[in-house]
Amino acid sequence: MRTVKNRNYIGGEWVDPATGEYFENRNPANRDDLIGVWPMSGAADVDRAVEAAVDGFKRWRSTPAPERGALLKRVGDLLEERKEEIARAATREMGKVLLETRGDVQEGIDTAYYAATEGRRLFGHTVPSELRQKWAMSYRRPIGPAGLVTPFNFPMAIPTWKMFPALVCGNSVILKPAEDVPHTATLLVQILIDAGIPPGVVNLVHGLGEQAGAALVAHPDVPVVSFTGSTETGRAIGRTCGEMHKRLSLEMGGKNAQIVMDDADMDLAIDGVLWGAFGTTGQRCTATSRLLLQDGIHDAFLDRLLVRTAALRLGDGLRDGVDVGPLINESALQKVEAYIAIGRSEAELRIGGRLASDDGLEDGFFFEPTIFSEVAPGSRMAIEEIFGPVLSVIRFHDVDEAFFINNEVSYGLSSSLYTRDTNVAFRAFAELDNGLTYINAPTIGAEAHLPFGGVKQTGNGHREGGWEVYEFYSETKVCYVDYSGSLQRAQIDNYDAGPY
């Protein structure tokens, strides 16, 4: 069978890598399924893409913002038309079930339509001047080529979260997707081409993070960088961008807790933790990694949760009836196995903890949904991100203790509280140190028109999504017009003679 050889997209053309090297993209549910090979790009490829993006930016920035938004509307329409095709391609290369990749594509559609409307809403401010016959205003202007480095777990949604706002604001982009999901990125760029994106405005460079990604982040002609991935990698990117005075948005790790009070709707809370902990095989930055159960319901809740977890079906995400797909690759599998060993030394393994051994799963990276109980606050299983289908159950006595346990980790992305007590719910909004807090819903489920991001080691203060991301991808320019015909001095005491 002929192997499909794919290319980078630079300056309006599909081009081979300067390195002449390629990497394989295989189905994590079946390692014998070779999807194709993609460019193993290096610094020379990044240089070429940035040069194209600089030229594209010169033309694109002068395109009226409503016109830029209209192009994104066409992109949304094409994503809608090709939703099933893209969802199946995404499941094949990253593993999560088709229900989830359909949602992944829908997030891209929603982001496109939201971005289209923002093309008419890049608001500035017009304010009164402190001086007579003087006019003052601010407006948003584009910055330049933006380097976008994206992860594997949302191969459509996260690139669109970054790319579409950047484009509407008038920037050009260079996308370096995770090497595990090059096909979905290629399909996205083809849709932008079909929608009429001008040459050089969108560029796609495949390759490894330590090669192509690092070269993109460090390129002197890329003033804006947006990264989603591990805290360790984000820390290194932060050092580079800080030294080079680049604008940087970081979206990194999480160790998210679902808190269940004695008065909670137990059925609803069990549904929530199953979805939050084992959806996307636990490979979300917002995944429910910790389950905090109050004393009164702890034992009964855990017993019912174990029964429901045992019923989850592992398998190829393209097959009907599958609940949990594979991990993304061998490295992810090894990391989960290492934490199982840690968990056995710290807590009580209640279910899972093994490679899946069912027939038909031996050729993929399948790991059983795993639950540890009697996890101690402050232990490694309680505070370290695993990024796999592993849930740590922690017992607590009262709401103050629950909030303390939630906040003791170094991350601060998402939190969830199940209760019928309105007062406790509103305390959670104020006291939980997270960028997102859900009441009576799981820790996952962000919406495209609201800001997304966290605090502490989860991020650096910027947000994806919603209205705030448009501020990240644009600069504020303040303009003054003095039509008095005489020298007027601001920032000087002009009030000695009185205000009239």
Image: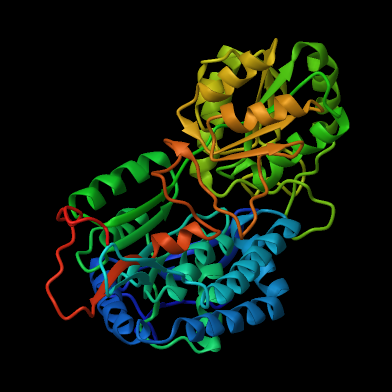
Residue 493, image x, y percentages: 16, 53
Using the image, determine if residue 85 lies above or below residue 104.
below
Using the image, determine if residue 165 lies above or below residue 339.
below
Residue 322, image x, y percentages: 79, 50
One can see residue 352 in this view: no
Using the image, determine if residue 6 lies above or below residue 490.
below
Along the viewing direction, whichever of 364 and 161 lies nearer the viewer: 161
Task: Identify the residue at image location x=61%, y=60%.
Answer: 449
The single residue placed furthest to the left in the displayed view is 487
Task: Identify the residue at image location x=50%, y=27%.
Answer: 384
Q: Quadrant of the C terminus?
A: bottom left
Viewed as shown, does residue 3 lie left or right of 215?
right
Task: Identify the residue at image location x=60%, y=81%.
Answer: 73
Viewed as shown, does residue 334 lie left or right of 349?
left
What is the total number of numbered labels drawn onto the structure image?
0
Residue 117, image x, y percentages: 58, 75
Location of residue 345 by image quarter: top right
Along the viewing direction, whichever of 307 and 1 lies nearer the viewer: 307
Location of residue 156 by image quarter: bottom right
Q: Quadrant of the N terminus?
A: bottom right
One can see residue 221 in this view: yes
Using the image, determine if residue 229 lies above or below residue 73.
above
Tell me, what colour scheme is on the image? rainbow
Viewed as shown, does residue 174 lie left or right of 120?
left
Location of residue 424 by image quarter: top right
Residue 106, image x, y percentages: 68, 66
Along the viewing direction, whichever of 319 and 188 lies nearer the viewer: 188
